[in-house]
Amino acid sequence: MTWTPFYLLECQLRAVGQLRVSLHRNMCNRQAQVRWRSGSRPAPLLTARPTRALIDEPISIDAHHLPSHTPITVRANLTSEDGDLWEALSHYHTDAKGALNLMRDPSMGGSYVGCEPMGLFWALQPVPGSREGLRLRKRDVETPYAVHLSLLEGFVSPEDTRGKGSEEGQELAKTVVDRWYMAPGVRRIEVRQNGVVGSMFLPPGPGPFPAVLDLWGMGGGLVEYRSALLASHGMASLALAYFGHKDIPGPLNRINVGDSYFQAAFQLLQKHPQVCEDRIAVMGLSFGVYLSLRIASQLSVKPRCVVGINGPLGSFNTFSTEDGQKESFEENQRHWSYDEQGYVSFREVSSPSNIPSENYAKVEDMCCPLLYIVGEDDMSAASLENADEIEKRLHTAGKSHLFTRLSYPGAGHLIEPPYAPNARVSLWTTRPRQLMTLWGGHLAAHAAAQKDSWQRILGFLECHLRGEK
């Protein structure tokens, strides 16, 4: 290549231009640093109170010593037990005193809008580029979620925090809050007794305590976090495994236990020296609702009350009294449906019109109050139709007074304790192929449903487990 005088001159001019741009950027950055780190004023301060709290306790977040009327982003992030990063961002303007109060001030954008004091927690989502189909669930309830809160300069998007966006986003202050399912003094006891597999959670103190038998759905395994939280509110709770657990004999993809197993679990609670034997409730979500209704209406035990969340009145596959189900859930896919992205919905599997009438729980024989919670955007179970059928059967039996329904527009299937982020879609299985399932729920509406329903569940349990019949 020939280095002509014109080419050299062009290179020199280009270098001068780049130098000018570089000097301009450095000067802007230096001015920004002066604005935020002036020696004549305190550094920005971010506070969260309390810094250690139960997962269902609200947190008060405040910021001080910022310039007045300035755009600011408040960020929350946490790393899940699987190593995935979850994040939420909200945009605010400081007031005339250079302060923010999330209990008072509305978010102008980001992960949510409006005055949502706990929005940074319920709006957490996997960061861009994460694995598909993630759902945030706590496995080790004896450790907290460490949620990192930070103040960022300007209005920042998720892409900016990954280093791909604008030069906004300088971190100005930070703090950490620990979110627990287990309060100090709550005890977790592994249960492997009389064939029963689960985990018992006991509140602090000698008792005796009212208790809850806690059942989840066809995701299988042993889910403990709701039981841990119930014990943190003064109720003993047994999180019960009944499907897809290595300590229960039989194929992992099939329910291999029948009525005698659930009766043994209920009686294990009754006989515990720190449990009030006649003050026990049953709570179920999804397929756990059918099991809860079956326990209350067809077994020789007498729960004080039942809580059902988005679940069916019956079982599509026949449920035997001793052996559970001979078929796996996957063996009969007649009522599975798929959206345009290939995500599966199990909603029609639980439709009362598709469940053989002989497989219904005999709710007309129930003698205890039932609180049934409906997410109106449930895409995994026909919850509204099941609520209607249960209500009709109890009315026909002259037992309408036993039924209370809570119905939430915009809420999906997974109505859990408050401030936990909703997964509208998540991974269902990887075998024989990867399959995503639809749960439903819109973020803000679902969060509102979780907050309201949890307070009502606690009130319902308090009334029927501690009050007189």
Image (tube, rainbow, N blue to C red):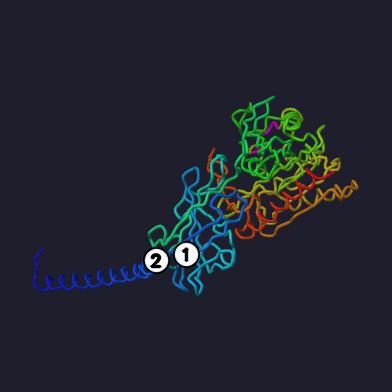
- Residue type at mark 2: give it: Glu
Instruction: Name the residue located 69 percent from the left edge and 39 percent from the top edge.
Output: 214
Percent x, y for residue 332? 67, 39
Which residue is identified by label 1?
Answer: 73
Relative to 197, is 204 above or below? below
* Quarter of the C terminus within the rendering: top right
Q: How many other residues sit within 10 Å of disc 2, few (<14), some (14-19) or many (≥20)?
A: some
Q: Determine if the magenta segment contains residue 328.
A: yes
Q: Main secondary structure of the magenta part?
A: loop
State left or right for residue 20 relative to residue 244.
left
Find residue 172 and report its horizontal and vertical position in percent.
Answer: 41, 62
- Tell me, yes or no, if residue 320 can be seen here: no
Q: Nearer the viewer, residue 324 or 404?
A: 404
Residue pictured at 46% horizontal, 72% vertical: 70
- Residue segment shown in magenta: 325-329
Secondary structure of residue under mark 2: loop
Position of 126 relative to 109 (above/below): above
Q: Which residue is mark 2?
A: 168
Looking at the image, tell me whether mark 2 or mark 1 is earlier in sequence order.
Answer: 1
